[in-house]
Image (cartoon, grey):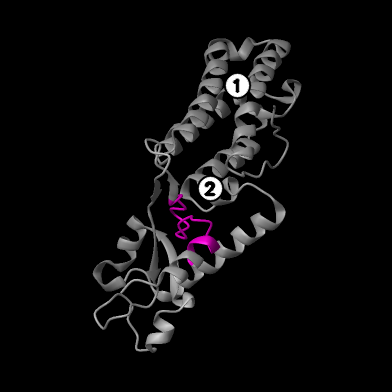
Amino acid sequence: MAFNAKVAEMLAYRSAYICNNPECNTLTVGAALNDSSLKLKLGEAAHIIGEKPKAARHENIGKEKLSSIENGIWLCANCHTMIDKIDGIEFKKEELYDWKEKHEKMISMLLKTHKSPVPLLVRQTDNFDLAQSLVDFLSGKGAFYEPASIENPTHVVLSLDETRKFINREMKKIQLDVELKKVFSSVSKCVQEVMNETSRSAQNLDVQELDDYLTVMRRKVGKQLKILQDKYGCSITGQITTIV
C-alpha cells in the first residue's frame, strides 16, 4: 500500500523532489510544456522496509512504523522499481537509510547557504570521479604548469602522449554526459595540437618556441578546468590553474 498523501508530500519536500539514490539524483517534478495547467511527477515515496510479508526487506515492525515517514524514501520511479527487485536483496535497509540521511542533510545545507545543488549532486556520481581523476592527472604533469626552460622537450612530448592516452581511455567510461565528454575531448585535442607541432623536432626545439606552444595549450586547458570546477565541483590541486 502506498504512503498517505501527507507523508509522500513531506518526503518529496525534504528531498527537494530529487531522487535520493546518489547514483541517480534525477529531478522528479517539472512542467508539462504543452499545457500550462499540468505538471509532470516522476518521483515516488518508497518503503524502506516493505509493508507486506512478501515485500522487499519486510520486517514485522508494526503497521504504524511501516507507514511512518521514517520508513519512507523519495525515489524516481526507476530507482523505486530497482531497489525492490528480487525481494530487495541487493539494497539493504541500512543502505537506503544512509541514502536518505545524506540526501536530506545535503538539501538542508544547500537551502540554508543559498547554494546550487548541481555541483554537490554531481559529486556523488561516477562521472564526478572521472572528472576529478582528469584534474588530478593533469596536476601531476609538469607540462601543464612548469616553465618551459626547465622542461626537457623530449620528456614533454612523452608526457603529453601519456596524457592523451589517459584521457582517451577514461573518456570511454563517461556515462550519459555529453558535456563532460566534450571537456575530455577538448583537453585531448589541446594536447594533440602541441604534440603535432613538437614531435618531429623535439630534440632541436627552441625553448621559447616550446614555451609558446605550452602557453597556448595551458590557456585552453584552463578553460576546461574552469568547467570541471564550476559544474562538477572538482577540486583544482597543485599548480595547474583555471581560466575564465
Above or below: residue 116 compared with residue 92: above
Magenta stretch, residue numbers: 11-28
Badge 1 is on which residue? 154
Q: Amino acid at mark 1?
A: Thr
- Give 7 or 108, whichever is nearer the viewer: 7
User: Total of numbered circles in the picture?
Assistant: 2
**Amino acid type at image mark 2:** Val
User: Does residue 140 appear in this view?
Assistant: no
Residue sitting at x 50%, y 43%: 130
Badge 2 marks a residue whose secondary structure is helix
Specify few, some or many for label 1: CA neighbours under 10 Å numbering under 14, 14-19, or 20 or more.
Answer: some
Please state the horizontal and vertical placement of residue 140, each as a whole percent of the image. Answer: 64, 38
Camera-side mark, 1 or 2: 2
Which image quadrant: the C terminus?
A: top right
Q: Residue 64 placed where, x, y %?
A: 42, 86
15 falls in the magenta region? yes
- Name above or below for residue 13 compared with residue 142: below
Whole-number angstrom distance, CA of label 1 to CA of label 2: 38 Å
- Mark 1 or 2 closer to N-term? 2
Residue under the image location 59 percent in, 49 percent down: 117
- Assign the N terminus to one quadrant of the image: bottom left
